Image (cartoon, rainbow, N blue to C red):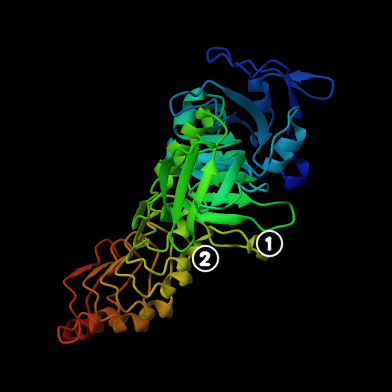
């Protein structure tokens, strides 16, 4: 459909007029565009080429879920990339912090080479728009933000991921008697206290979720807190004033002695697993449903913790929910979680299951519905503890032989098997016998 422009003929108008778009009037979309020696209005820009259109760019800090007025109207073509838009606008934009949001819900990170207008057109076509001229006109409307919108800048996530760091210089002493006080820089980040002795010495780290905090009143240090850490004795921290003391006490009470075995970060717009989770070795239930988690793609990110590859660090997990993350492949690293009892990978785009799944010998519940799976590895028949298997709404054309063997009453405890919504047209006699 979009063949009139080639990528080399990108006709992006480089600048909008200085005042337009900052406080756009919903009833007057007459944005004036600057080009080489002449001016085009919105309709003329659209009429001039079928590949021309508009996107609206929102600032997530100024734009709440129900506020679509604070936006920039950007003229571009279906070939214009995020990087090109950033380089040609008359304001600084970071091509690495662009997102597209669908239906006011899921946020997806865009790469610098992605083409926003093309993404917008594809989405409108997918929901039933079939008139190209109408699709062009939709880009100018504020109401389109309820269906699809583009954002750039710092995203606002759940408050539990947002707490600011606390930083100050504190008088530190180990133990109560005959010890000197030393002034050290201390920072609380998430559930971790970092104490910096000096520029040439490695910092000392305290995992606050494994510590206890007490209020202590000393004559020489009236604003004092006592941290008791398993295996490290006691640590006394003398703050500088009452305000600082109250602030640090409040934060420490929220984070100390908080080793929990259940974490729910569903629908949190995550691309990486929160780092504060990795200090909790006791985690047994982890819900990461409805996010945008990704596998580590290149070696340059090998030292960044939080990719889906790092989930193998949670060796005590018994329940893992990764449903609705748009995963295109089965995360092989899951097969290293040998204590896993429940695994939910529903509503992704997975096509095949790795044979290594047989390593999950404790697995009892396996949800793989609403994927693109058309075949199962024969190794799945070795999961003798499986009780609940859901393979509904996949691409199976027949009942997998491995399933037939798995559900044999003499070698399995399977009580539920769901295969609805597949492409199975007939059930063979062989499958029934097995």
Say few, some or many: other residues with alpha carbon within 10 Å of mark 2 (under 14 / 14 to 19 / 20 or more).
Answer: some
Q: Quadrant of the C terminus?
A: bottom left
Residue 206 place in picture, x, y as percent: 52, 54
Q: Quadrant of the N terminus?
A: top right
Residue 350 place in picture, x, y as percent: 43, 64
What mark, if any, has residue 128 been given in the picture? none
Residue 336 place in picture, x, y as percent: 43, 74
Which residue is under mark 1?
A: 300
Q: Residue furthest right?
A: 37
Marks counted in the figure total 2
Q: Secondary structure at mark 2?
A: helix
Can residue 273 be spotted in the picture? no
Q: Secondary structure at mark 1?
A: helix
Q: Is residue 264 left or right of residue 106?
A: left
Q: Is residue 67 above or below residue 25?
A: below
Residue located 57% across and 33% down the image: 240
What mark, if any, has residue 309 been given in the picture? 2
């Amino acid at each position: 459909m979009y063949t009139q422009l080639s990528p080399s003929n990108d006709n992006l108008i480089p600048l909008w007029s200085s005042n337009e778009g900052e406080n756009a009037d919903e009833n007057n979309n007459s944005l004036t565009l600057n080009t080489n020696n002449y001016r085009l209005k919105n309709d003329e820009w659209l009429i001039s080429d079928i590949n021309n259109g508009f996107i609206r760019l929102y600032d997530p800090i100024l734009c709440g879920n129900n506020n679509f007025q604070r936006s920039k109207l950007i003229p571009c073509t279906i070939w214009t990339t995020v990087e090109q838009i950033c380089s040609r606008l008359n304001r600084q934009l970071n091509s690495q912090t662009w997102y597209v949001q669908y239906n006011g819900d899921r946020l997806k990170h865009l790469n610098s080479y992605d083409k926003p207008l093309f993404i917008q057109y594809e989405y409108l076509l997918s929901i039933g728009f079939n008139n190209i001229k109408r699709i062009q006109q939709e880009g100018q409307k504020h109401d389109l933000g309820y269906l699809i919108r583009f954002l750039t800048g710092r995203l606002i996530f759940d408050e539990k991921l947002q707490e600011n760091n606390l930083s100050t210089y504190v008088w530190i002493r180990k133990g109560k008697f005959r010890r000197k006080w030393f002034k050290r820089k201390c920072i609380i980040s998430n559930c971790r206290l970092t104490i910096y002795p000096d520029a040439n010495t490695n910092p000392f780290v305290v995992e606050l979720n494994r510590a206890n905090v007490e209020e202590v009143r000393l004559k020489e240090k009236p604003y004092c807190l006592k941290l008791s850490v398993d295996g490290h004795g006691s640590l006394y921290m003398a703050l500088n004033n009452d305000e600082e003391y109250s602030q640090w006490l409040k934060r420490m009470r929220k984070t100390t002695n908080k080793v929990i075995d259940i974490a729910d970060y569903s629908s949190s717009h995550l691309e990486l697993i929160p780092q504060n989770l990795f200090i909790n070795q006791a985690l047994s239930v982890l819900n990461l449903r409805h996010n945008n988690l990704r596998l580590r793609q290149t070696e340059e990110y090998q030292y960044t913790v939080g990719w889906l590859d790092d989930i193998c660090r949670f060796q005590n997990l018994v329940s893992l929910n990764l449903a609705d993350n748009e995963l295109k492949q089965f995360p092989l690293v899951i097969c290293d979680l040998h204590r896993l009892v429940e695994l939910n990978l529903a509503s992704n785009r997975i096509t095949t299951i790795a044979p290594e799944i047989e390593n999950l010998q404790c697995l009892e519940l396996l949800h793989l519905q609403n994927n693109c799976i058309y075949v199962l590895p024969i190794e799945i028949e070795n999961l003798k503890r499986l009780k609940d298997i859901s393979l509904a709404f996949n691409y199976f054309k027949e009942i997998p032989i491995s399933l037939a063997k798995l559900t044999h009453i003499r070698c399995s405890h399977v009580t539920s098997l769901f295969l609805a919504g597949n492409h199975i047209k007939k059930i063979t006699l062989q499958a029934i016998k097995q």
